Image (cartoon, rainbow, N blue to C red):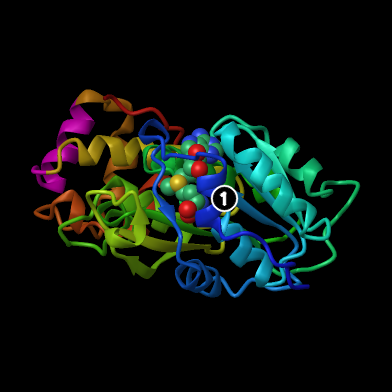
Amino acid sequence: MSLPRLPAVRDIIKLYGLSARSQLSQNFILDKNITDKIVRTTAMNAKTPLVLEVGPGPGLLTRSILDADARNVVAVEKDDRFISALKQLAESSGDRLKVLQGNMLTIPDEEILSAAKLGPANPMDSTDPIHIIGNLPFNVASPLLIQWLHKLAGRQGLFGLGDASVWMTLMFQKEVGQRLSAEVSTQHRGRLAVMTQSLCQVKTVYTVPSTVFVPQPKVDASVVQLVPKPAFHIGDTAGVYLTLENILRYFFTKRRKTVGHILNRLSKEMPRAKEAIAEAEVGLDKKARPEDISTDQFCQMAMIFHRQNIVDLPL
Ligand code: SAM
């Protein structure tokens, strides 16, 4: 399923006068060895039922995805200047690529599924994982991930297609990548690490130096792979996840305080949570700081609070 010979992406950029727009965080990769390497980390292939690419820009990563034999690719790009070049790539892809112009933060999943010809009436014919992939615009990377984690917890939209797992392989600024994968009691440990690790195995698969991008950004990037874990709670996982987020906000806005201090304060501010707090603090080291609490311990706390209907915490 190889692509016909196409003009080099570098030439497409020249041909269409596609200068990078900083307000869209455009830093392009023009070296196909690199985009091939990113795609290889996903092990996607002809059996992959769907690949969603976010922010394809001039389309080199898209070419690598098609060269990996992906047969159902939907690419969502906000900047209309790229659409005609991407449509040309779609035409030469043998109907394997669909291009949607839109904002990934607001585009409905139904639009993506309809372009991919998937949904309740068209179930997938493969149990292989769906892949979301992107050299993400840095300024929307974190909000997008948070949105996807919510959908994953609630098994909604793309994350609710039968039993299919959705793997995410995403480029982040290196520092954000470190925050996502931070282990307990390490420098970068915070809310984002626990939120992400409560639902996914998180692995940095590739560190990409800033020199690879055109124009060159100030910082290096890393490709992080997120593979959903079995749900940490049977039943209302979305509700428990929401409780977890509220607990994390409460704890990590007091990150210099000890766990004992934080829980005491919570029981004063919220007397009706006393019973849940008493149950949750069993096994916790009161002298520890929020970054020392493991993801499992936070999930356990969220399950206890949720069971006792303590969902919203004071700010
Ligand atoms: N994938 C290309 C590459 O690797 O060279 C371009 C990467 S560039 C860092 C980010 C791309 O995301 C740009 O093409 C930009 O126009 C697009 N973009 C920015 N915000 C977006 C959004 N909210 N939804 C979809 N695409 C967006």
Q: Residue at x 32, y 39 (%)?
A: 247
Residue in the picture at 59% in, 40% down: 82
| Residue 200: image location, x then y, percent | 47, 60
The stretch in magenta equals 256-268
Q: Main secondary structure of the magenta part?
A: helix
Q: Position of residue 77 (x, y in %)?
A: 59, 40
Residue 12 magenta-highlighted: no
Magenta stretch contains residue 267: yes
Quadrant of the rendering where the C terminus is positioned: top left
Q: Measured from the top left, where is residue 188 in percent x and y?
A: 20, 55
Is 131 left or right of 211, judged from the image as shown? Answer: right
- Between 51 and 285, the one nearer to me in the picture: 51
User: Which type of secondary structure does the marked residue at label 1 adopt?
Assistant: helix
Residue in the foreground of this view, choosing between 140 and 63: 63
Residue denoted by label 1:
12
Give the x, y percent position of residue 201. Answer: 45, 65
How packed mark 1 is, by other alpha carbons closer than 10 Å (few <14, some 14-19, many 20 or more), is some
The picture quadrant where one finds residue 296 is: bottom left
Question: For the image shown, how many numbered marks are present on the structure?
Answer: 1
Identify the residue at image location x=13%, y=45%.
260
Examine the image and state in which quarter residue 133 appears: bottom right
Residue 239 visible in rendering: no
Task: State the residue in front, 196 or 62.
Answer: 62
Query: Please, which residue is most extreme toward the right here?
Result: 121
242 lies above or below 229: above
**Amino acid type at mark 1:** Ile
Q: Is residue 113 left or right of residue 282?
A: right
Residue 204 falls left or right of residue 229: left
Tell me, yes or no, if residue 253 can be seen here: yes
